[in-house]
Image (cartoon, rainbow, N blue to C red):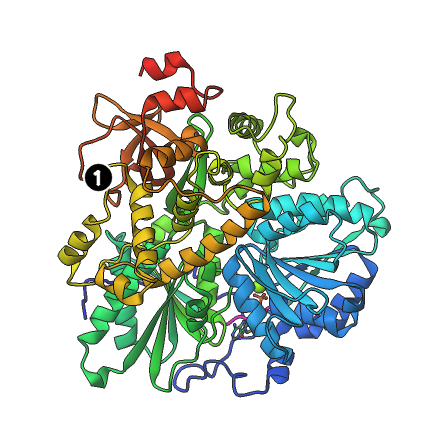
Amino acid sequence: MSSKIKFLKPGDDDIYTEDRSDVDQTSGTSFIYNPHRSLALDKQRQRLPVFLSRNHILHLIETHQTTIIIGETGSGKSTQIPQYLREAGWCADGTICVCEPRRVACTTLAARVAEEADVILGKEVGYAVRFDDRSTPGVTQIKFVTEGLLVREMMGDPLLRQYCAVILDEAHERTLYTDIVLGLLKKVLRRRKDLRLVVCSATVDADHLFNFFNRNTTSDHTKDTATIIPVEGRNYPVEVFYLEEAAPNYIKSSAETVMKIHLKEGAGDVLVFLTGAEEVDACVSLIKEHVSSLPKTQGSVLVVGMHGSLSNADQLRAFQTPPVGVRKVVVATNIAETSITIPGIVYVVDSGFVKMRWYNADSCTESLVVVPTSRASATQRAGRAGRVRAGKVYRLYPEAEYEKLSEVSPPEMMRTSLSSAVLCLMALGIENMLRFDFPSPPPARHLTAALDELFALAAITEEGKLSQPLGQHMAEFPLMPHLAKMLLVSGEYGCSEEILSIVAMLQVQNVFKQPRGQNRHARIMHRKFEVSEGDLITLLNVYMGYIKHGSSRQWCVDNCIGHRAMARAAEIRARMEKLLIKFEVPIKSSEGGVDAVCRCITMGLFPNAAYLHPAGHYSTVRGRQTLHIHPSSVLYTQKQPQWVLFHEVLHTSKIYMRDLTVIDPAWLLELAPHFYEKTTIHNV
Ligand code: ADP
Ligand code: MG
């Protein structure tokens, strides 16, 4: 294998060698991945660190409204605490809700807990995530839900009467919805003294949360309604390796490092951290290619990808135990950092990057930016290698870079567009955002920008109230407000069939496949769908082709289209159609008319308009942000259109717009007069 990569061992300040009194000295020659794996499930459960605190935790929950549990990833918080509550009889008073930042965590944890509790998934233990509900009202005792779903449940049940306890998991992630749920639950707890909140965090800086829940009470700590309990973690030392020089291409470098580990290191599974689904897929293919050229004597490797846009069945593949003698390599996005625990990992390859949302209040655009991780993230990722025995982490950057990383990332609330959050809060009756008790108040400018945008989308009235029924329905749609708006007005434009397909296609990734060695062929096949109106209409063409050919897998293969992505899009489309029918939106087709579809798209995406600047790049009307057409866009190779609307902005080497639609600027004035003035459009 390539000897290009030379890892350097760091000096004395190896962060993992200090204070490890519980180091397992048996590692070295005989490798045991999961010493508990052969044990019965109940014995495995008893080996987890939280088990030692089981009674203490139950006592604290009994006596405090809010209990904050701090424990390292893998200590058993997510899988055990709901079961402890269930075993202690809490379900007599309602369901136990476990609230997760991510869909993947909901589905995999629910499957695991159902297995441990020996019940059928979907019955006593279930989950509900966007577009997928596997729970049975009246039967489900433990229900895993995403944060966004919990907020939407509150629109129908503001005091969460169906639940006896809410476990807010992964609170350290501080996603936008973590903070919203924290703020809302604080209000609910005041009204419902019987409700219990358990906050789980993998990091120790829980004082902030402790103070948040005890704020407004007295300085007398005997009256505290919240308490903190740390759970002892069990972690083995992890040796850290750095690159001598930064890797020019971290995907390639990750694949090479995996091969190096496979050939040079002892048994043990490998976990690779990249930033997104596309990178994961590319890296999986690269590793498979390397592996296929290995002689049989070099052992076999099972390579699996793990990211949020995989189907549930595919996500579960990452958890399967490889056959004896086979090394498993899991290539994952950030979801494997703390949300899920993949058993058997001994080696971690850390690209050093993460994809984050970043908001620009001038241009009202939110971009996905690939940025260096924080030191806290790097430590978390490294820790994944030390779960079963002493492990190793390979950071694909020089040690000097590590020192320059920021300590933690700012909470999402501070750096994303607030329009969907504000819309949800308004639907919950919170009208004065500035007075809402946020754990970390967002910048006032971001709040105003969100209100402006919602007003322009007609979700709120001039009096600053949620419009009825449009605003209310937009809030209930589990989509960004722009897309919800597009769907809700699609009946008026006579093209709801088309908009449903387009929005469903925007929810999935990897529609266009580039099978190795067939790039040219794939380009030719994909070109058949391409139209000068842009990517959204192209996606519509793909979806229509798929349906016309009976949702056939063979048709997908022949056209280099991802079959799984299409099946998922069809599933999502069916759910959204139900919602539209519920909201009495007529389901109509434009019967091939594109103009109506493009106008309807404009009704939702108008804030994301950009025009061609004489200098050759694009510029947003508001804020004059410079943008470029992403190479994946069908417009990339065509004559540059004067005006486009984008669905997403991606910030890599340049700021790219993705998922484009070509428009007539006159539509902006006609359809969004609150947002665009004549002078701004004509003067560009
Ligand atoms: P925490 O929430 O503290 O990070 P979890 O409760 O998620 O910990 O996991 C505890 C342990 O349960 C893990 O270390 C792992 O051994 C096991 N486990 C969790 N999920 C699964 C799964 N889907 N398959 C197999 N084992 C799992
Ligand atoms: Mg957990």
Magenta segment, principal secondary structure? loop
313 relative to 628 in the view: left or right = right
Tell me which residue sits at (33%, 52%) in the image.
544
Q: Is residue 273 visible?
A: no
2 relative to 192 in the view: left or right = left
- For the residue pair 172 and 607, the one nearer the viewer reads as 607
Tell me which residue sits at (42%, 15%) in the image.
677
Give the vertical position of 653 relative to 276 (above or below). Answer: above
Relative image position of residue 592 (x, y in whole percent): 32, 41
Circle 1 residue: 636
Relative image position of residue 14 (x, y in whole percent): 43, 61
- For the residue pair 540 and 507, the one nearer the viewer reads as 540
Q: Residues within 10 Å of mark 1 (few under 14, many from 20)?
A: few
Give the vertical position of 411 relative to 322 (above or below). Answer: above
425 relative to 609 in the view: left or right = right
- The magenta segment: 233-237
The picture quadrant where one finds residue 623 is: top left
